[in-house]
Image (cartoon, rainbow, N blue to C red):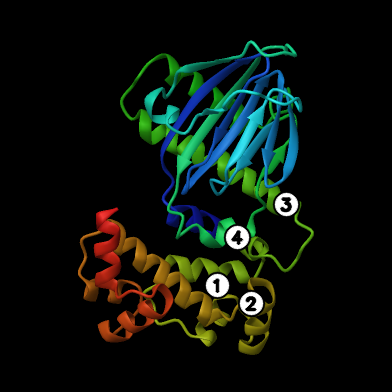
Amino acid sequence: MDALSKIFDDIHLNHSEYIYLKAQNNWAFQHQEHGAMVAYIMMHGQCVLHIADKQIMLESGDLLLVPSGLPHLCTASQNAVFQDATDIHPLFDEKHQKTIHLESEQHPKHEESLILAIRGRVDSIMAKPLFNALPHYLHIHHILSSTAPEWLQIGLQFLAVEANQIRPGRDKILDHLVSILFIECVRDHIAQLSDSQNWLNALTHVELSSALAAIHGQPEFAWTVESLAEQCCMSRSKFANLFTQIIGETPLAYLQQHRLRLASQHLRHGDLSIQQIAHRVGYSSETAFSQSFKRSYELTPSQYRVKHTRL
């Protein structure tokens, strides 16, 4: 499995849902959800999305992805809205697959807009390297034009079918469709990157991607700088220097942090013993694993498990 595929496998995208927002006049909605990716496809009309002190104009056919659940506000225009913005966070679970009407009597009047809002939950700890490397939002223009990629056309057709009838396997299909949508957005962003020293570039780097795929594919293996360099068909020194230059940390430091993130996932969602988790993420000693884990998370593995079981 290639590096980018393994990254998306690790973050466990699930519980994907979508709603249609039919908005009229001077409307507004907001969303904030830790551990969720959200995408908006402007089916028709236009709006302004406010995020991280920026205003982004969305026009018919545009797609905007908010990867890390950052709080944002969407309004009909740049005009002030004098009523509370509708929080759409709970609507994904309460009104999934439905059309939500957002109307306002406020002036000025605006043409009706239709927005397809899609949400997929992710493991935010496992997704941390990805979220840190991505910008606050990804904006793709005119994605619904006649030249739209075939994957998107097929995906939207599937969404339309699933909206009209509930069929067996629907949740799994939806998770796959949302995964495809997010992966394509990330691939599009990587293709346009001008910053060579970006973790995302390593995912498609001719040589380094093999090391990342190895680390994420076999975290339990006793990797050394030499064995990772062999995966990339590079000398030890050249590999170590290139990895540190692009990733921003040494190969073994990156390996350790990935192992500990993976361990945190097992502690939060699994029933494996501490010893089993230690071995699964590449530690031969439970004591060494516990010490390393506590240095990073300021809790022992047992304390961390208890804390997150209560949440």
Would residue 242 appear left or right of 179 to someone viewing this image? Answer: right
Q: Is residue 291 above or below residue 201?
A: below
Q: Nearer the viewer, mark 4 or mark 1?
A: 4
The residue under label 3 is which amino acid type? Ala
Query: Can residue 12 be seen here?
Result: yes
Tag 3, which secondary structure? helix
Quarter of the image for residue 80 reads: top right
Q: Residues within 10 Å of mark 3 (few under 14, many from 20)?
A: few
- Could you tell me how far apart the alpha carbons at marks 4 and 1 are, in whole angstroms? 20 Å
Tag 4, which secondary structure? helix
Tag 1, which secondary structure? helix
- Could you tell me how far apart the alpha carbons at marks 4 and 2 are, in whole angstroms? 17 Å
The residue under label 2 is which amino acid type? Phe
Report the residue at 53% width, 85% height from top. Answer: 225
Q: Which disc number belongs to residue 211?
A: 1
Q: Which residue is mark 3?
A: 191
Q: Which residue is mark 2?
A: 243
Q: Which disc number belongs to residue 132?
A: 4
The residue under label 1 is which amino acid type? Ala
Whole-percent x and y of residue 158?
Answer: 49, 24
First-in-chain label (4 vs 3)? 4
Confirm or deny contact between disc 1 and disc 2 (CB under 8 A): yes
- Could you tell me how far apart the alpha carbons at marks 3 and 1 are, in whole angstroms? 20 Å
Whole-percent x and y of residue 96?
Answer: 42, 24
Q: Nearer the viewer, mark 1 or mark 2?
A: 2
- Could you tell me how far apart the alpha carbons at marks 4 and 3 are, in whole angstroms? 18 Å
Q: Is residue 278 above or below residue 162?
A: below
Would residue 269 appear left or right of 6 to someone viewing this image? Answer: left
Tag 2, which secondary structure? helix
Q: Is residue 119 above or below residue 144?
A: below
